[in-house]
Image (cartoon, rainbow, N blue to C red):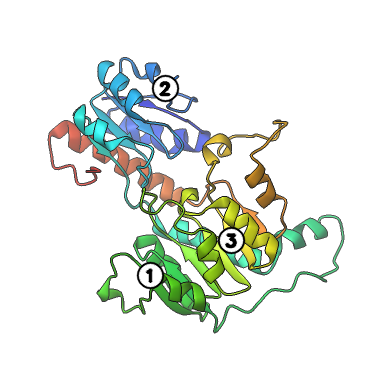
Amino acid sequence: MKIAFFDTKSYWKDSFAPMAEKYGYEITFFNERLTPATAHLAAGHDATCSFVNDEVPAEVIRELKDLGIKVLLLRCAGFDSVDLAVAKECGLPVLRVPAYSPQSVAEQGAALLMAINRKCHLSYQRTTKFNFDIAGLTGIALYGKTAGIIGTGKIGQCMIDILKGFGMNIIAYDAFPNPNLGLEYVTLDELYARSDVISIHCPLMPATRHMVDKDAFAKMKDGVIFINVARGGLVDSEALADAVESGKVRGVGMDVCEVEHEYFFEDRSNLEKHDPTLARLLANEKVLISGHQAFLTEEALEQMAKVTLDNAKAFLAGEELVNEVK
């Protein structure tokens, strides 16, 4: 199998190239993201391999079909970048990696929570300049506080385990509650009203886009800490910026943002103009944003490579495609 691999970075090549050799697959690593302008690069390949910020709308899928692509491989859990209806129409299975290392993602969420709460980023900025004044760095003790978890899938469950270790009380919301988890499930409104910390772990779909909006922030406790290591589109960014600037939100830790396809995974420091809402968030010391790196552990990268190539293997063998997005 020949795979056209888009949006290549060194860490992707380091994890995929050795494993592909073992599977007997040939990978062409393209630095470009998969977009309508770059889809032609897939010519001569059997499959494409794309990530969260690649663009796979209808026009790209139809072009890939015409180029002879037989299967669309996603090296991620999210699939909102792909027009699934058109992929089905073209007979191109979409195979994803539903769970690579939920612990890694949850650990990044916990790291952001601890950093923004105890103002580690501000402390670091001071101490590198030999400024050891700790005034203005006061946080809250998480022990005994209430954490509201929105979405109790694999990553949400890992986050719950971590926060339980901090001695936090857990309440949860999920559109499909899991009775086997022994959690206290509540409505979203109750979760907003009771939580000192809110961490969201949902897929991005039309039904969940901007599920956390101006009204949601108004229902939250004053001084809430908000964590998002899921998808940027779950949150209305302008409403978030307003909530931070008004003092409603004590702190925000994010590994994602709404406009990350314009920024993330690249050095954009040379741009003269930036998205105004993202600029507002980054300018506020109550906000800490990492560049979609929650997946970036050795264990997660290895698992992403293995499952992606196993998906390709199952397709070639005509086996059941357990990771196909329907």
Residue 106 x %, y % = 46, 61
In this rendered view, identify the residue nearer to me: 217 or 323.
217
Residue 112, numbered circle? 3
Is tag 2's residue or tag 1's residue first in the polypeptide sequence? 2
- Residue name at image x 86 percent, y 55 percent: 129
Residue 85 x %, y % = 25, 35
In this rendered view, identify the residue nearer to me: 293 or 80.
80
Name the residue at the front extreme.
Answer: 215
**Left-right relation of 121 to 79:** right
Residue 173, numbered circle? 1
Verify CB contact (< 8 Å) between mark 2 and mark 1.
no
- Residue name at image x 63 percent, y 72 percent: 223
Is tag 2's residue or tag 3's residue first in the polypeptide sequence? 2
Pointer 2 residue? 36
Residue 265 x %, y % = 55, 38
Residue 3 x %, y % = 32, 26
* Spatial separation of the CA atoms under disc 1 and disc 3: 21 Å
**Left-right relation of 291 to 132:** left
User: What amino acid type should be assigned to the residue bearing mark 1?
Assistant: Tyr
Q: Tell me if residue 221 can be seen.
A: yes
